[in-house]
Amino acid sequence: MKKTILSLFAVFLFFYSCKSTREIPETPEVPVSPDTEEIVEVIPEEVETPEALPKEEVKWDPNTPKNIEEFRAAWIATVANINWPSKPGLSTSAQQQEALELLDFLEAHNFNAVIFQVRPQADALYNSEIEPWSYYLTGEQGKAPEPYYDPLKFWVNAAHQRGLELHVWLNPYRAHHTTGKEISEKSIIKTNPELVVELENGMWWMDPAQKGTQDRSSAVVMDIVKRYDVDGIHFDDYFYPYDSYNNGKDFPDDSSWRSYQAASGELSRGDWRRESVNVFIKRIYEEIKAEKPHVKFGLSPFGIWRPGYPESVKGYDQYDKLYADAKLWLNKGWIDYYTPQLYWKISQLEQSFPELLGWWQSENTKQRHLWPGMNVGGEGDQMHITEVINQIMITRGMLPQSKGAVHWSIGPLLKNKELAKAIKEGPYRKKTLVPPSPWLDNTPPQIPNVTVNEDLDKIEMTWGVENDEDIKKWVLYFKYETGNWDYKIFNSEKRSQSLQKEVGVKKVQLEKIGITSVDRNGNQSEFIEIKVN
């Protein structure tokens, strides 16, 4: 037996200056909001061009032989028990079993992230001193699971054990959903009636312009960030509610509007509403970064910013209806990743998936991650499968520097076995790393110490670093003489692996290997090639 020990260790510093019940609209005049299906009006309007923005930091380059980065996530909705749990009031063991089945599915199909809804209606699917336990969890708002467990802690631990990032998805303003049954005494509607308004479809909404609303939602976000090992905070398209929720009538915020006017406010009502949301989005981003810079902040706004942007696009005007200036937030870099809900087909002329994706990328002046939301719902036939696969491939081609997508939702992936199989055997046939975020951290982790043992028909490798606190994964790259580089991704607990010295009938020999460490931001250590033959 030959034994070769290669000790390769260094620390490099490298700096450069550098939903909800969603259904998919087929026509722009009848867009479907994530909670209900209503006809909405289109009102185009001109907007100002944002000011020039500074350049961003350049991504650290580990010089690996392959680019193996792509964000692959699915939403898991809890409102109305869409995805989990399957119904309110399940036992703790049944809830946990269902959760593990969902996470096992994502791991087996080579996803690397899950976006899990924990605040569907000013409630909590986790242990909170701010808001009551969710009705969707136990069947009674304010009632904890029995026997007791903390679902979010369970989800975080189980996701990380499977190599998945866990992003918590919160609705910042919704106070009560129509499927939430009776309003309990612990609801914000009863405890803080001054912050909420009732809509004509039976929902209740927190008034985004009130400081109390912003403080409450900020406290909820930061409570999660401080107490749980989450990888991201995620908001979707619910800012001011869809006007259909109030039978087309204006949002009932007369009281706060009059207070603003009495204080000599000069903005128009629409601008005042948009500014309230702008201030809140910026605040959340800054507060997260001050507490835990590695926790990503992501947003999935409605897929059309405004009709006419780009020129051929028609549809719902979120700027004018939801008072969401989603383009501004992207321009300003108040997020780490953007997931516009591009739930239309490639060939849908007035809402074409690639045309809208190209427009959002043109507005991505800070070069944040742009991982579009994709609709995977459908009949499950070959035409549907082809559409989903083509959208993934188009995204890769248009956004090669930071590939990724988020799928709405895990439900159709579970239901349509052939779709899930086609994705796994096609574009998701190999596991990938979540792309790093250089504006948060572009300092690479330590290069592993690698020991290589040659024993009979195998090459055995062991590895580690002196300080592994920030190491979340390892990547083993390997190349046989007549082939291309390949790789395996392992969780942080894995410290050894063997490879066959020879493969195939022609006994092709293993030629080179290399092992990188990966930190929680997705940065890989410098790749060092090791010859083994």
Image (cartoon, helix red, strand yellow):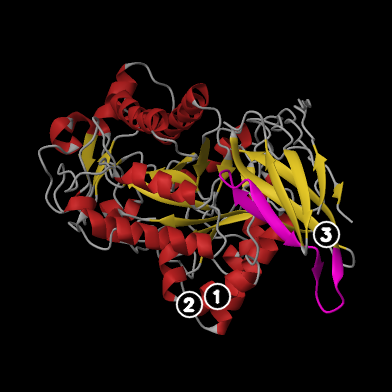
Per the image, the residue denoted by label 2 is 417
Instruction: Bin the neighbour count of mark 2 within 10 Å (Cα to Cα): few under 14, some 14-19, many 20 and up.
Output: few
Q: Distance between the residues labelled 2 and 1?
A: 6 Å
Q: Which amino acid does label 1 sit on?
A: Lys
Q: Does the magenta stretch include residue 489?
A: yes
Are discs 2 and 1 less than 8 Å apart at CB?
yes
Q: Which amino acid does label 2 sit on?
A: Lys
Which labelled disc corresponds to residue 421? 1
Q: Earlier in the sequence, mark 3 or mark 2?
A: 2
Secondary structure of the residue carrying tag 2 is: helix
Of the two numbered discs 3 and 2 in the rendering, the one whose residue sits closer to the viewer: 3
Q: What residue span does the magenta drawing correspond to?
A: 488-509
Decide: is 241 above or below 334.
below
Per the image, the residue denoted by label 3 is 479
Q: What residue type is labelled 3?
A: Lys
Are discs 1 and 3 less than 8 Å apart at CB?
no
In this orientation, does residue 239 appear? yes
Residue drawn at the location 34% of the way across and 51% of the way down: 243
Which labelled disc corresponds to residue 457? none
Secondary structure of the residue carrying tag 3 is: strand
Q: Position of residue 88 (x, y in %)?
A: 20, 57
Of the two numbered discs 1 and 3 in the rendering, the one whose residue sits closer to the viewer: 3
Q: How far apart are marks 3 and 2 (CA)?
A: 33 Å
Q: In the shown orientation, is residue 270 left or right of residue 247? A: right
